[in-house]
Image (tube, grey):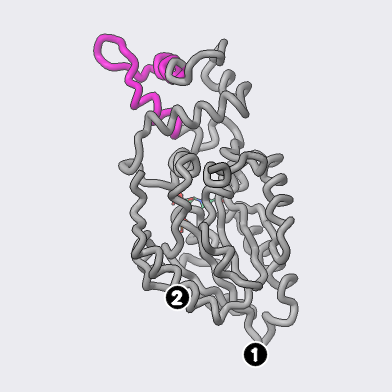
Amino acid sequence: MQIGWYPGHMKKARELINDLIKNIDLVVEILDARLPQSSANPVLQELRGRRPFIRVLNKEDLADPTVTKAWKNYFEQEEGVKALPLTAKNRSAAASLQKLCRKLVPKLGKPGRPLRVMIVGIPNVGKSTLINTLAGKKIARVGDKPAITTCHQQIDLRNGILLADTPGLLWPNLEDQEGAQRLAASGAIGENAYDQVAVALFALNTLVKDYPQRLKERYKLADLDVETSELLATIGSKRGCLVAGGEVDTRRAAELLLRELRGGKLGRISLETPSQPRQSDTL
Ligand code: G4P
């Protein structure tokens, strides 16, 4: 799966973060609450050193609340780490994040002693959305593409907090293929970069295992105890994803399933739980 990150870009981004972070008091990594491990950057934990670290579990509105709670507990086992579930689009997100920042670094964030916060995350986790909510207006961002690693800007929230925004700097863990499939299923990766049918089958597997009732209800399925390819064909047939001659158009069925999953039509769904070891942990 090609996501547009190459070793040279990663090395450069790593050096840039290392350089920028010297002037930072607190690091905020935005994760996707539906797949917090797979949407994390593999080296940020190391780069942050001993700085307080907030892991924002964004898109809380789309994730399973019980699983999000489990992730919060999981991340907070680590010293100096707080996890904060939120919905970046909501105005309340700004207040809860700023409150936590001030709590973690109480001596700063006052006139003459700004609290310097770095906001990072892989593409599509909601950095722009959250920064706009924090700033209370739309902030124009430059270079917000993976692999463009030289742009960053500082945003003064005018309340003692300075945000260092690092658009597009971080990359996901591409070695973990299951993680990459979850990222694709969540919509974080451009559609041309993966096989839609394979990702839909992967998502179906998760749904059969973790959310069988929702799947049955949404697509009026009587029996889930069949191959996922058969399930996808049944969904396609029920939803009229057909080619001439009446055969199921598997690609359209895959697109439909992924679109509905991402849009919350199956309810609030998490694609991974803290109890699932990552592929890279088990090698
Ligand atoms: P980025 O800067 O990290 O790349 O991410 P960005 O803010 O551009 O957000 C990526 C997509 O995720 C956007 O959707 C955005 O609306 C959506 N998003 C961000 N935060 C939340 C959230 O808390 N909940 C939900 N449900 N969605 C969120 P898009 O379809 O790409 O753009 P748009 O049509 O919404 O503008």
Sequence-wise, the earlier of marks 1 and 2 is 1
Quadrant of res 233: top left
Q: Is residue 73 above or below residue 65?
A: below
Q: Read off the residue under disc 2.
A: 153
Q: Which residues make up the magenta segment?
A: 231-258
In terms of secondary structure, where does tag 2 sit? strand
Res. 215 visible in picture: yes
Q: Read off the residue under disc 1.
A: 112
Look at label 1 and name its amino acid.
Gly
Res. 135 visible in picture: no
Q: Is residue 71 above or below residue 213?
A: below
Q: Residue at x 62, y 39 (%)?
A: 276
Predominant secondary structure, magenta span: helix
Q: Quarter of the image for the N terminus: give it.
A: top left
Q: Residue furthest bottom?
A: 112
Which is more toward the observer, 65 or 173?
173
Question: Measured from the top left, where is residue 121 in percent x and y?
Answer: 51, 60
Look at label 2 and name its amino acid.
Gln
Q: Residue furthest front?
A: 283
Q: CA distance from mark 1 to mark 2?
A: 20 Å
Q: Residues within 10 Å of mark 1 (few under 14, many from 20)?
A: few
Q: Residue at x 53, y 48 (%)?
A: 38
Q: Residue at x 66, y 52 (%)?
A: 85
Quadrant of res 156: bottom right
In terms of secondary structure, where does tag 1 sit? loop
Q: Is residue 48 above or below residue 174?
A: below
Question: Measured from the top left, where is residue 107 in percent x and y?
Answer: 73, 82
> Is the CB–ligand 1 distance for label 2 below 8 Å?
no
Is 257 magenta? The answer is yes
Question: Measured from the top left, where is residue 72 in percent x and y?
Answer: 70, 51
